[in-house]
Amino acid sequence: MDELLKLAAKAVEIAIELGAEQADAYVSASHGISVSVENNSVASCRSIEDQGMSIRAYKKGALGFTYTQRLTENAPRRLAETAVRLAGAAEPDPDFVSLPLPEDEPTVRGLWDDAVAGLTIEESVGWVTAAVEEARALEPDISIAGGVGVGWGEHAVANSLGVEREGHSTSASLYAHGSIREGDEVGSYWEFTRARRLSEFVPQGIGEVVAREARRMLAKRPIESATLPIILGPLAASSIPGSVAMLAQAEAVQRNRSILAGRKGDKIGSEVLTIIDEPLREGGMSSGPHDGEGAARRDLPLVTEGKLATYLHNSYTANKGHEPNTAHGSRSGYRSTVGISSTNLNLRRGDMLSDELIRETRRGVYMPHASVHPNSVTGDVSETIDVGLMIEDGEITFPIKNSMLGGSFLDFLKNVDVVTKDYRAEPGLELPTVRIQGVRIAGAG
C-alpha cells in the first residue's frame, strides 16, 4: 500500500506545481475470481486483475479528471498534466469550495483476511457446484443459476490539503437462484451468503434453502385487490432504509430531484422508524474508516423516530449546502469521479419477534424478497410481488400470483408499525422484519 500512496501523493504534488489550486488522486490494485453457473453447470470461470490511478484537478472550481490503468513511474506526471489542462479548459464552478481536510481516522477491524486472498478458482467452483448438488438432492429437476465472487485489493487516496489514506479489503460471496417447473407452474427463489473473512463465509446450505423455498412458491393463487398489511422479511425490509438513503443523497436533494428536498428535520415516518448509517462496524461489507475522498467516517443517524436527521454528503455537496461533510463520498473505482452512497444501514429494532408478528396478523401478505423503491421525484411506489405469501388468521398459507403493490413511499414510512427484535445477520447489518399497514395490493382474483 505504501507504493500506491506514494503514487497518489506524487500525482497531487505535480498537479499543484502545474497550476491546480487543489487536487486529489486515487490509486487501486485488485484481484478477483468469478465463477458463474447456468442450468446447473459451470458456465464460466475468470481470474481478474486490475489496477489504475485517477486524478481530479481544480482551477477556479472547474474540474479536470482523467485516469490510467498503467501504474508506471511516469503515470503521475502524465495524469497531472492532462487533468490540469482539462481543468483550465472547463467552465468555472462557483459551488466548488474545497476537498476534505485531514482528520483523525477511526479504526475498523475485520476488513482483510489472508485466507480469502489466498483462495483459488478450484475452491470457488467447489462452493457453487456443492450448492447445485444440495438443491438437486432435494429437487432433482430444479434449475440453478448463480455464481461465486471472490475479491481482494488495496487502495490509496491523497489530496493537496494533506489527506493521505490507504486501506485494503477482502470479500467472498455466493449467490444461487433456483426454479422448479411443474406443468404451467414455476416456483423460484434465491439466496446468498457473503463475508469479508473466510471464517464467517458459510456457503453450506444455500442450495437447500433455494430448493425448499422454490418448492413452496409453486401452486400460486390469485387474490382479490385489497388494502392489507405487508410484512417484509429481513431482505425485503432492507429496501426501506436503502430507499430513504437514496432519497437523502444531497446531490439529488440540491437538484430538487428527491421528495426529501427541504424536508430535513421533518417527520417523514412513524416513530418506530430509526435508521442509522454505521460505517465502522467490524467486518461490514460497506465498512471502512474513510470515504472515497479520504474523509474520516463516523456513525450517523439518518432518521430518528421518524424525523429526517440529515442528508448524505460528499465534500462538494456539503460545501455547496453549507452543511457538515458526512463522509459519504463514493468511488466505484479509479475510473469514476466521486458520487454519494450510504454504508451499513441499520434499523433500530423493537420488542416483537417475527413469528409473533405473523401470528397476530389476521390477513396480509408476507414478502421474503421485495423491492420497495420509489420514484425519487414523485415518491410513487409500484412493484410486482414476485415472491409473496398470503397470511390468513396468523398463518402463512399459499403463494400469490399476478399481484402488485402500490402507493406513496412516504405513506409507507408513516405506516410502519413494527420493526422486530429478531433479525438476519449479514456482515455489518442486522436485518429485522418490518410490517407496513394499509398497503394497496392490486390482485387478479
Image: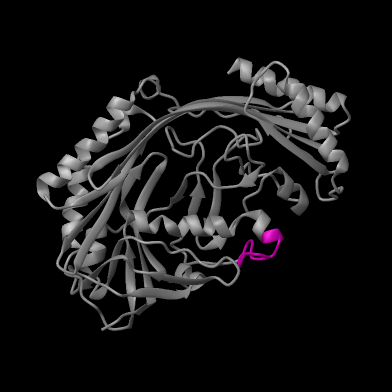
Q: Position of residue 211 (x, y in %)?
A: 18, 51
Q: Position of residue 372 (x, y in %)?
A: 43, 64
Side (left or right) of 437 relative to 139? right
Q: Quadrant of the C terminus?
A: bottom left
Considering depth in this image, is 119 or 361 the residue closer to the camera?
A: 119
Residue 175 visible in this rendered orientation of the protein: no
Say above or below: 2 vs 88: above
Q: Quadrant of the N terminus?
A: top right
* Residue ID at (31%, 45%): 146
The answer to which quarter of the image holds residue 366 is bottom left
* Residue ID at (38%, 67%): 417
Q: Main secondary structure of the magenta part?
A: loop
Say above or below: 255 vs 228: above
* Residue ID at (57%, 65%): 376
Q: Position of residue 241 (x, y in %)?
A: 47, 56
* Residue ID at (84%, 27%): 16
Magenta-span inclusion, residue 145: no
Q: Which residues are magenta?
A: 253-265
Query: Which residue reaches farthest front?
Result: 43
The answer to which quarter of the image holds residue 97 is top right
Side (left or right) of 431 relative to 169? left
The answer to which quarter of the image holds residue 298 is top right
Side (left or right) of 399 relative to 264? left
Considering depth in this image, is 142 or 385 the residue closer to the camera?
A: 142
Say above or below: 17 vs 67: above
Considering depth in this image, is 101 or 79 the residue closer to the camera?
A: 79
Task: Give the total of numbered labels.
Answer: 0
Residue 384 visible in this rendered orientation of the protein: yes
Q: Position of residue 381 (x, y in %)?
A: 47, 71
